[in-house]
Image (tube, rainbow, N blue to C red):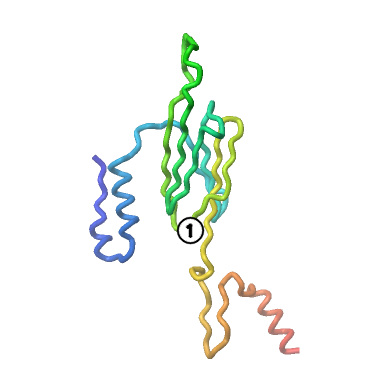
C-alpha cells in the first residue's frame, strides 16, 4: 500500500486543505479502469489539452461538464440495433465517465471531436488582482510586472531623459 502522510505539511500551511484532501483521495480511489484512454498535454505555460479516444461515439452521445475545479466527461451509447449478431466484438461500446481535477483559474476554452478523438482545450486565466505587481514608493503608480519595460528599454528611456 502506497500512502502518503501529509500531516507535517498540514501543520505548517494554511489554506491548502483542499489540495491535501485531493491528493489523499486520489491515492485511495485510483481508477483501475483505463477506458477510454486519454492524453494530457501542456501546450504552453497557460494552455493544456486533454485528448480522449472515443471511437464510435457521436457528438450527441458525449456530455462535457465544467464545474468549479472539475471537468467531467461522460459518454453514453444508445443501445441501437440489438438485432445485430457479432461474431467478435473488439470495439468497446460501453458508457464511460472521466473526471479531471482542475487547478484554480483553469477554464474550458473549446472542445472538438474529430477522427474518434475528443480534444478539450483548457486555458489558465489568472485574474489581474492575483498577478505579481510592483508596489509604489512615494505615491508613484504601481504596475504589473508584465507591463514593466525591459532593462534595454529603461536604459534607452534614461538616455532620452538625459538629452
- Residue at 44%, 50% (x, y): give it: 67
Q: Where is residue 160 in the image (x, y as percent from the top left)?
A: 74, 84
Q: Is residue 115 above or below residue 104?
A: above
- Residue at 41%, 32% (x, y): give it: 34
Q: Quadrant of residue 6?
A: bottom left
Location of the C terminus by quadrant is: bottom right
Q: Position of residue 157 (x, y in %)?
A: 70, 81
Horizontal side, residue 101 vs residue 124: left or right: left
- Residue at 52%, 74% (x, y): give it: 133
Q: In front: 30, or 98?
A: 98
Q: In front: 135, or 97?
A: 97
Horizontal side, residue 33 vs residue 122: left or right: left
Q: Where is residue 101 in the image (x, y as percent from the top left)?
A: 41, 48
Horizontal side, residue 57 vs residue 97: left or right: right
The total number of labels drawn is 1
Q: Where is residue 114 in the image (x, y as percent from the top left)?
A: 61, 34
- Residue at 51%, 35% (x, y): give it: 62
Q: In front: 155, or 30?
A: 30
Write down the residue under mark 1.
Answer: 105
Location of the N terminus by quadrant is: top left
Amino acid at each position: 500500500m502506497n500512502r502518503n502522510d501529509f500531516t507535517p505539511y498540514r501543520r505548517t500551511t494554511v489554506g491548502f486543505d483542499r489540495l491535501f484532501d485531493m491528493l489523499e483521495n486520489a491515492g485511495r480511489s485510483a481508477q483501475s479502469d483505463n477506458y477510454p484512454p486519454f492524453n494530457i498535454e501542456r501546450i504552453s505555460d497557460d494552455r493544456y489539452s486533454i485528448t480522449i479516444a472515443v471511437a464510435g461515439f457521436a457528438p450527441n452521445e458525449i456530455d462535457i461538464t465544467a464545474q468549479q475545479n472539475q471537468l467531467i466527461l461522460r459518454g453514453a451509447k444508445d443501445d441501437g440495433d440489438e438485432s445485430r449478431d457479432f461474431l467478435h466484438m473488439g470495439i468497446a461500446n460501453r458508457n464511460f465517465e472521466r473526471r479531471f481535477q482542475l487547478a484554480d483559474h483553469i477554464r474550458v476554452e473549446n472542445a472538438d471531436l474529430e477522427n474518434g478523438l475528443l480534444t478539450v482545450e483548457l486555458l489558465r486565466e489568472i485574474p489581474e488582482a492575483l498577478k505579481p505587481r510592483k508596489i509604489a514608493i512615494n505615491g508613484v503608480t504601481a504596475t504589473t510586472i508584465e507591463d514593466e519595460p525591459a532593462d534595454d528599454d529603461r536604459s534607452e528611456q534614461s538616455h532620452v531623459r538625459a538629452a
